[in-house]
Each structure stands twice: as structure tokens, then as C-alpha cells.
Image (tube, grey):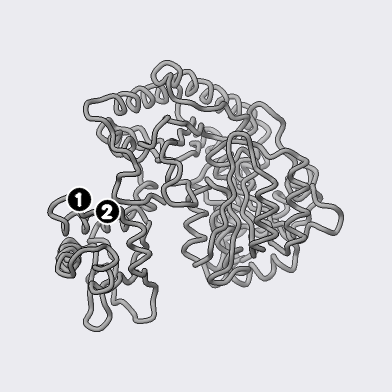
């Protein structure tokens, strides 16, 4: 909070050249200082500059932006007055948000107003009857656990066994000691990079990729080496070249119905990537959170099953129940060699000690009955996907997209770089949606794309697309992203 946080010397900072690169030419608008302050505020709110980061001194930023020091000082004054910056004598100016303010990473997870259609989350609701049945099974088990202290950094043994059995049934023999239960797949990723990487290490990532994973990598001060992924899949030649030349410490991939593109990595490429990462000494982190959402193809075998015997210890697999069951339960896991699991548990103790016993018991009960209702859920998702495709054909026939064989969203090409402007305008029509730029590892990319989830009922999806198309067609033309005074992560 601005009234209680005191910046510390030696903390994070952003240099004048770096900030200048994030800002386009703001000197074209008048008054310049107000537009400069607005542009920096937008960077803070959208998470492109983190909170509690030291801004460059006025005397350093002014020549970088080719404006007077007085103009930069006036902009900083305006940021301080509005609560988006604070200063302490001798420590400079630091980013902040005012009381009650939220950065984009937080606000997009908040429930939308009732009148809004929320297309920012590619996740499903949990059927009430499924939850009620599971809770009835959990009650006596929870009573037994209440007699203990309740802490287990590895996770409940019955849940670890259930997850291990899930891998074994899919073709990858797994023991419970190879599993640690986490608070969602995001914590599994953060524990992994916290244990295996240090500031400045290189991480190979797909471009585009899951925004929260990219942000976790940035906040760990790791350097990304992006490799492209399109509807046609992965370019293995570029990936292997990156592994040889960059020699990244870690690689993060989403091979199953990639988020946001939706493509599925072929079996032959999986084995090739396993060999290439082993040769470069790169830890391979595979995100399989969408693997079960297979709509037109069989559920893919675990990625690590494509490693030759004795050559898969560098493959780390993360997964969760957030996509197949419910994100509100916060159950994820990580599969790796037992030695690495032990080290991750030690790190996990410093983060949150252990996961919720209630959530873990509920997860066990739901996994026991998954076969009874997962088929019905997949049929529902498939119907919603087809409904979204139909809505796009009716209301936005000029947009381009491919129907994915699984996953929870379409990666839509608008034909011009106006996605961020469209997302802003769509708020006025009662629709929340992510610009494609949120998924880019590089600045300025994917502004011609929208990720549209098909996790809502068919009639809601039809109305959402109708509103989006109306937003694009109304009145004044949308501003091209290449002219917008900010970069969306």
C-alpha cells in the first residue's frame, strides 16, 4: 500500500533505455507530460512494469525520450498525485497503485459484473451435483485427518497415488514418490524455476504462450528465448537451433492443445525434443494441464513416455485439475525424479508449508468418479466449441481461425493489429476478453489475435461474438496497436 510500503535501496529498477523502449512517441500529443504519465500508468496497470520497481531518474529519462527534464518531472508529479508512484528522499521514485487499485494480472481474475460476459478465463465451472456427491464422500475422511496436524509438503499420499496411477494408465509407469501436489500448475512451475534457475538464466518458451507462465519467468529475472508456434505447429529446426546456440537452462512447453494456439505436437517431434534437450543439458518442463480436453482425438500419452529408457530424468511434467474439474479447487502436481521431488518439497515449505487437506481429499473423491461424468463434460465442451465456431461464421465471417482438436479456446485472427483497442472497446459492450498481445513473449506481437474460450453456454457465446463484432464495426476506426503508446505483455 502506498502509505505503508517503504522502497528499499538495492531493489528492482528499470533503466531509462528499457522504459523508453516500452513507450512509443508520446511527444505527438499535448500536453506531453500528461500523456507520458498516462503511458507509464498503463504499463503499471497492465503488469508490464511490476510494482515496487524504481523508475529512472528524471535527468536520465529526459534525454532518452528527447524531452525536457521539466516535462518528465511534471509527469512523475502527476503519477505521485494519482497514487501510481511514490518517492522517498534519497531512494528515488517507485511504481505503485493507489488504494483499491488493481494491476491487470489481478483484475482479470476478479468476477465480472453480472451484465458482463467474461471471456478472459479458459476454464470450466463444476457441476453442482458432482460437487455435492464428492463432498458427501469427503466428510468422514476429513474427520479422520482432523486428528493430525494437517501439514504434508509432498501432498496427501492417496492423492499422490491417484495422480501416479493416472500417469501409469496413460502409458507412463509412475510411483507416488515421483509426485508432489501443489496449489495449481502455476505453483508447480514457480517452484521449478525457483529451484532450478537463477537470475539471468535463459529459458526457452513458445511464442505465444500462457501469460501467467511468461510473467513468472519475467519476475524471476530470467531471460526468454522464444520459439514460434502456429496453427501448423512447432518449427523443430528453430527449436533445435535455439537449444544448440542459446543452451537454455530450462524449456517450458505446452504440447497438448497449446494455450492459446490449440495445436497438438506430433509424437515424432516429442521424442526429438526430448533428445535435443537432453543433449543441450536443458531441463524440459511440460505443461499438460489441457491434455484431458481431447475433443476429436484420443488423449495424448504423457510427454515423458517418449523418452528412451534412462533418458527422461530431465523431463518435468506439471498438471492440474483446473481445466478438467474446477480451477477454484487449486489442485496441481508435478512429476519428476524422486530426488528432485524431495528438493521441491523443501522449497515448497518456504512458500506455503502444505496444501489444503480438504481440497486434496475432494480431489481424490472427484478423481475416483471422473469416468462417470468426464465423457459428458467433453461432449459439452465439444458442443460449445462448435457453437462458438458457428457464431463466428454468422457475426464475424471475415475473421480467420482453425478448429482445434482439443483445448478450451480458439485463436482468432482479426486481420489487422487492433486486438487491444477492440478489447478496450468491448468493455463498453459488456464483454471482457484478452488481446492476443497478452500471450506474446516478444513486445508488440499478436495484436491481430484474440483468444476466445468456448467455456460458456452456446447462447452466451453467440451473444459475446455478436457484441465483439459490433464493437469492431461501430463508429470511429480502431487505433492500430503499432501507434498505441504501450506494450502489452
Q: Residue at x 64, y 53 (%)?
A: 318
Relative height, residue 197 to residue 394 (above, below): below
**In x, y percent, where is residue 32?**
16, 56
Q: CA distance from mark 1 to mark 2?
A: 7 Å
Q: Residues within 10 Å of mark 1 (few under 14, many from 20)?
A: few
Relative height, residue 260 to residue 340 (above, below): above
**In x, y percent, where is residue 78?**
16, 62
Q: Could you say which is closer to the camera, residue 214 or residue 99? A: 214
- Contact? badges 1 and 2 (CB < 8 Å): yes
Q: Could you say which is closer to the camera, residue 136 or residue 14? A: 14
Q: Could you say which is closer to the camera, residue 290 or residue 148? A: 290
Residue at the spot of label 1: 28
Q: Residue at x 34, y 65 (%)?
A: 51
**In x, y percent, where is residue 269?**
74, 43
Residue 25 — which label?
2
Residue extending furthest toward the bottom: 90
**In x, y percent, where is residue 312?**
79, 57
Amino acid at each position: 500500500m502506498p502509505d505503508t510500503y517503504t522502497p528499499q535501496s538495492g531493489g528492482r529498477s528499470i533503466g531509462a533505455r528499457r522504459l523508453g523502449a516500452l513507450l512509443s512517441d508520446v511527444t505527438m500529443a499535448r500536453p506531453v507530460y500528461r500523456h507520458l504519465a498516462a503511458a507509464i500508468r498503463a504499463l503499471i496497470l497492465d503488469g508490464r512494469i511490476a510494482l515496487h520497481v524504481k523508475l529512472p531518474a528524471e535527468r536520465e529519462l529526459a534525454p532518452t525520450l528527447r524531452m525536457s527534464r521539466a516535462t518528465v518531472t511534471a509527469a512523475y508529479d502527476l503519477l505521485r498525485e494519482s497514487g501510481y508512484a511514490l518517492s522517498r528522499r534519497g531512494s528515488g521514485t517507485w511504481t505503485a497503485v493507489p488504494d483499491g487499485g488493481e494491476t491487470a494480472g489481478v483484475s482479470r481474475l476478479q468476477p465480472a459484473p453480472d451484465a458482463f460476459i467474461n471471456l478472459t478465463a479458459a476454464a470450466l465451472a463444476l457441476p453442482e451435483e458432482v460437487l455435492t456427491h464428492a463432498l458427501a464422500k469427503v466428510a468422514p475422511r476429513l474427520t479422520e485427518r482432523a486428528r493430525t496436524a494437517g501439514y504434508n509438503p509432498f501432498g496427501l499420499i492417496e492423492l499422490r497415488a491417484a495422480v501416479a496411477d493416472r500417469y501409469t494408465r496413460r502409458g507412463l509407469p509412475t510411483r507416488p514418490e515421483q509426485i508432489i501436489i501443489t496449489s495449481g500448475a502455476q505453483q508447480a512451475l514457480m517452484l521449478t524455476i525457483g529451484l532450478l534457475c537463477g537470475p539471468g538464466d535463459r529459458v526457452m518458451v513458445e511464442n505465444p504462450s500462457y501469460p501467467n507462465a511468461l510473467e513468472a519467468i519475467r519476475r524471476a529475472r530470467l531471460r526468454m528465448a522464444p520459439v514460434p508456434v502456429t496453427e501448423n505447429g512447432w518449427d523443430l529446426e528453430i527449436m533445435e537451433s535455439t537449444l544448440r546456440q542459446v543452451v537454455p537452462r530450462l524449456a517450458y512447453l505446452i504440447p497438448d492443445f497449446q494455450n492459446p494456439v490449440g495445436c497438438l505436437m506430433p509424437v515424432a517431434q516429442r521424442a526429438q525434443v526430448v533428445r535435443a534437450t537432453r543433449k543441450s543439458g536443458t531441463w524440459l518442463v511440460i505443461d499438460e494441464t489441457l491434455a484431458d480436453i481431447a475433443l476429436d482425438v484420443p488423449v495424448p500419452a504423457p510427454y515423458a513416455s517418449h523418452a528412451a529408457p534412462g533418458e527422461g530424468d530431465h523431463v518435468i511434467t506439471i498438471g492440474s485439475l483446473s481445466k478438467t474439474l474446477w480451477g477454484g479447487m487449486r489442485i496441481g502436481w508435478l512429476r519428476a525424479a524422486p530426488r528432485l521431488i524431495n528438493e521441491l518439497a523443501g522449497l515448497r515449505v518456504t512458500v506455503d508449508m502444505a496444501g489444503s487437506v480438504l481440497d486434496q481429499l475432494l480431489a481424490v473423491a472427484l478423481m475416483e468418479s471422473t469416468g462417470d461424468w468426464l465423457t459428458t463434460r467433453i461432449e459439452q465442451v465439444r458442443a460449445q466449441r462448435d457453437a462458438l465456431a458457428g457464431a463466428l461464421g454468422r457475426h464475424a465471417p471475415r475473421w480467420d481461425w482453425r478448429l482445434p482438436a482439443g483445448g478450451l479456446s480458439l485463436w482468432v485472427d482479426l486481420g489487422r493489429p487492433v486486438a487491444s483497442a477492440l478489447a478496450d472497446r468491448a468493455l463498453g459492450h459488456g464483454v471482457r476478453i484478452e488481446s492476443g498481445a497478452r500471450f506474446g513473449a516478444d513486445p508488440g506481437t499478436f495484436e491481430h489475435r484474440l483468444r476466445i474460450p468456448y467455456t460458456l453456454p452456446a447462447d452466451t457465446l453467440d451473444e459475446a461474438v455478436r457484441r465483439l463484432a459490433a464493437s469492431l464495426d461501430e463508429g470511429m476506426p480502431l487505433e492500430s496497436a503499432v501507434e498505441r503508446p504501450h506494450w502489452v505483455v
